[in-house]
Image (cartoon, helix red, strand yellow):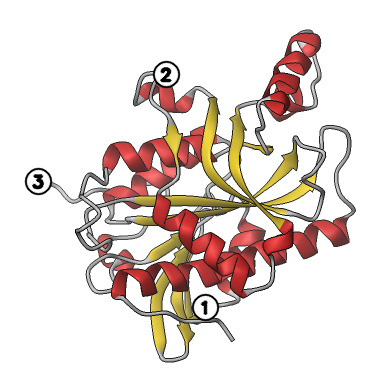
Amino acid sequence: MEPFDAHHLGIRPEHLEGNGGRGRVIFVPGSLARTQQIAEHFDGLEVHTNPRRLDVHLGRLRSNGQTVDVAAVPTGMGCASLGIVLTELIELGGRRFLRVGSAGTLQPQVSVGDLVVATAAVRDEGASDAYVPAEVPAVAHSDWIVALASASQKLGELDHTYLGLVHTKDSLYGREFPMGPRADENRRYMELLQRIGVLASEMESSHLFLLSTSRGPDVSPLSVGRGAADVIKAGTILAVIGDQHAWAPSDLAQETEARAVRVAVQAALDLVASEDGRAGVIS
């Protein structure tokens, strides 16, 4: 069999190796700027560029004697772009993915400046329909939910972190704001999501979760260790930087994203520590 050609990323399977055969923990933010912000936490940073600027950042996290092999790769905006990047990463051996994204709040209790850990996502997008029927839910892996909650506690973010459903859509301006000839219909749809308790709206998580669970399902009993290398684990943490009416001021948005990055980095340490039976805290 011919080796897989990661046409858009331009890396090889050996670039994603690490963590005792489980592969690198891979952060998958939407933007290159946030990717670079995450990579500032890496030791031994190595960057592989490519023509589409889906640059692959490789390195290690170190804390209290713990070393975790990591990567950060931007996915671009929307599920179609994420699907290309994530598929290439999975084909190359990636098995641990954490989206560090941004979102708009749907609930009055969730304010600009808060963080949201997604437990599952409303599938208001078309990319995942090419993989599974509409009845299949898009669910985050429980190990990431636990790790992100633990990291939020360690870093003093519990009062500003919410856990629950998020909404993934294809159209920012058509669906969320809403604009265009179907504005009234889209407004009613977003109001329905608010009434049923969806916390925030974003553009990638549902496809991230569906690709991960469909390509590497976790079907082991709880008595089995949680570090199986063939299981694909995907999670999401979101910085709330706006609502349906306005964006946050740039300084508040940047500060919120920085806090989301810090929680994500701690969660990566905690996830690997839990798989190894250890614990660590970032300095």
Residue 114, by quadrant, is bottom right
In this image, 263 relative to 200: left or right?
left
What is the number of the mark on residue 202? none
Q: Which residue is painted at 77% across and 45% down in the image?
A: 110
Q: Mark 2 points at which residue?
A: 134
> Which mark sits nearer the N-terminus, 1 or 3?
3
Which residue is outermost to the bottom?
65
Residue appearing at x 88%, y 39% in the figure:
246
- Label 2 crowd bin: few (<14), some (14–19), many (20+), radius 10 Å: few
Which residue in the structure is indicated by mark 3? Answer: 1
Extreme-left residue of the structure: 1
How many residues crowd mark 3 within 10 Å: few (<14), some (14–19), many (20+)?
few
Apparent side of residue 226 relative to residue 2 in the rendered image (left or right): right
181 relative to 218, above or below: above
Q: Nearer the viewer, mark 1 or mark 2?
A: 2
Residue at image position (36%, 66%) is 24
Looking at the rendered structure, the kind of residue marked 2 is Ala
Circle 3: element type: loop
- State the image coordinates of residue 182 (x, y, percent, origin top left): 75, 9
User: Which residue is at the front of the view, 197 or 114?
Assistant: 197
